[in-house]
Image (tube, helix red, strand yellow):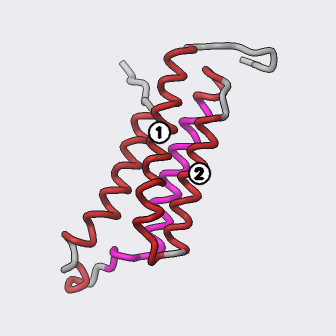
Amino acid sequence: MFRKINWDAFGIAASLACAIHCAILPLVLTSLPLFGVEIIDNVSFEYGMIALAFLVGAYSLYHGWKKHHHSVIPLIIFSVGILLLVAKQIWHNLQLVFLIPAVVFIVYAHLLNYKSCRKHNHAHKDDCNH
């Protein structure tokens, strides 16, 4: 009756939603300040989106690492993507230079995790305690 959540798919969707937000929102919703809504270049909102992407991605990749494939490569690739998102906020004038590779790294990490989970299904190592 209950459905399992595919955290990799959710992470990919969150990453793509973040990319769409960063690329299209400034073009489409430039009239929001007229209504008192300051979402464009809102530092709190941006860091909140990065935190959401980090939480969803970290949980998904940790689950895949712990229960299935025991490979840290998706975690490393994901970490590079998150660091690029933070760099985008620090060096705001280079936003697209950091954004595009960040999304590519994060989506690739989730795809690699997904494929590794399906390939190994439930591989065990000596240090596996489940």
Location of residue 63 with respect to 95 vertically, above or below: above
Q: Main secondary structure of the magenta part?
A: helix
Q: Report the Cα–Cα distance between label 2 and label 1.
A: 11 Å
Bin the neighbour count of mark 2 within 10 Å (Cα to Cα): few under 14, some 14-19, many 20 and up.
some
Callout 2: SS: helix
What x and y, as percent, mark residue 116? 54, 23
Residue at 50 percent of width and 66 percent of height? 47
Residue at 53 percent of width and 30 percent of height? 113
Location of residue 100 with respect to 92 vertically, above or below: above
Residue at 26 percent of width and 67 percent of height? 25
Q: Which residue is mark 2?
A: 80
Callout 2 amino acid = Val
What x and y, as percent, mark residue 91? 52, 75
Viewer-closest of 78 and 65:
78
Callout 1 amino acid = Tyr
What x and y, as percent, mark residue 55? 55, 48
Which quarter of the figure is the N terminus placed in? top left
Viewer-closest of 110 and 6:
110
Bin the neighbour count of mark 1 within 10 Å (Cα to Cα): few under 14, some 14-19, many 20 and up.
some
Quarter of the image for residue 10 reads top left
How many numbered circles does the render carry? 2
Viewer-closest of 44 and 123:
123
Q: Is residue 47 magenta?
A: yes
Residue at 52 percent of width and 43 percent of height? 57
Q: Which residue is mark 1?
A: 108
Indicate which disc, 2 or 1, sits on the residue closer to the N terminus.
2
Quarter of the image for residue 40 reads bottom left
| Residue lying farthest to the front in this orientation | 97
| Residue lying farthest to the right in this orientation | 126
Q: Which residues are magenta?
A: 38-63
5 sits left or right of 87 in the view: left
Q: Which mark is residue 49?
A: none
